[in-house]
Image: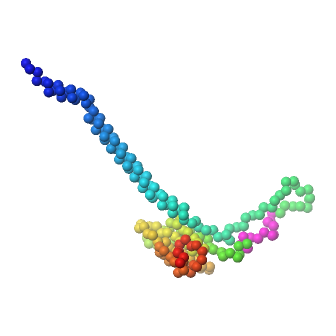
Amino acid sequence: MTDNLGPMRQAMSDLAEHGGSTDMYERALRKSRQSQRRTAFTTGAAAVVLAIGAPVTFATVNRPGPSTPVATQPPAPSVAPTSATPSTTPSSTPSTTPPSSSTPSSTRTSNRPQYPDCPSAKTLEKLVKLPKDWYFVPSSVSCWRAWATAEPDGPITGDGVYLFHYRAGGGWRYHSQGSAFHCEDLGITSGNPPFCEMD
């Protein structure tokens, strides 16, 4: 009887040499691809966060804060220097009122123009009829002298701002809206207003 099992033995020998490495090779490839996808996703997500966060941070850092008029701040209490040793004179009594020579802050700055307090976003919303579901972003309210700007936010992204003007006796009033203003059209001829362009 002849042995016809030679091809079968050869096939078994070949399988034994691999030892199941084909299965392990495919698993390693699959893990590698998953790792690459995970890395690509993480890198993409980080890029998106950076792309959104950087302009917001840049805009927030470069946006001027609301200015506080000097005249509306109460004067700092004056503190008279006291001596280290107590006075032995019976007629001397401590004074609770500030010295009469001090002048209030409004008197010291009377030669400078007085500007109003910067209004809140809610105050400005009452002065103009915004479309439904729109509001002024509180951090976007910015003031310069007697002018205030506010950026609206709502369902549709826009690029314009609302401009408000303060008049003594009339208070804050809506002026106009747009994405660019010319200072000369607003009657501004000096200074460095952040919301309009000087010609």
Number of callouts: 0
Q: Is residue 100 magenta?
A: yes
| Residue at horizontal 41 percent and vertical 50 percent from the top | 43
Q: Which residue is painted at 81% across and 61% down in the image? A: 80
Left/right placement of residue 52 relative to residue 6 reads: right
The image quadrant where one finds the N terminus is top left
Report x, y in % for residue 123: 55, 71
Is residue 172 among what the camera can see? no
Residue 73 coordinates in the image, percent (x, y): 68, 68
What coloring was used for the rendering?
Answer: rainbow
Determine the main secondary structure of the stretch shown in magenta: loop
- State the image quarter where residue 87 is shown: bottom right
Residue 77 vs 18, above or below: the answer is below
Q: Nearer the viewer, residue 46 or 162?
A: 46
Q: Which residue is farthest top?
A: 1
Q: Position of residue 146 (x, y in %)?
A: 59, 75
| Residue toward you, 24 or 105 | 24
In front here: 22 or 147?
22
In the displayed structure, does residue 70 sit left or right of residue 33? Answer: right
Q: Is residue 148 magenta?
A: no
Q: Residue at x 48, y 74 (%)?
A: 180
Please indicate, yes or no, whether residue 155 appears anywhere in the rendered image. yes
Q: Which residues are magenta?
A: 96-107
The x and y percentages for residue 86 are 87, 55
Left or right of residue 30, residue 142 in this image:
right
Vertical placement of 52 versus 32: above or below? below
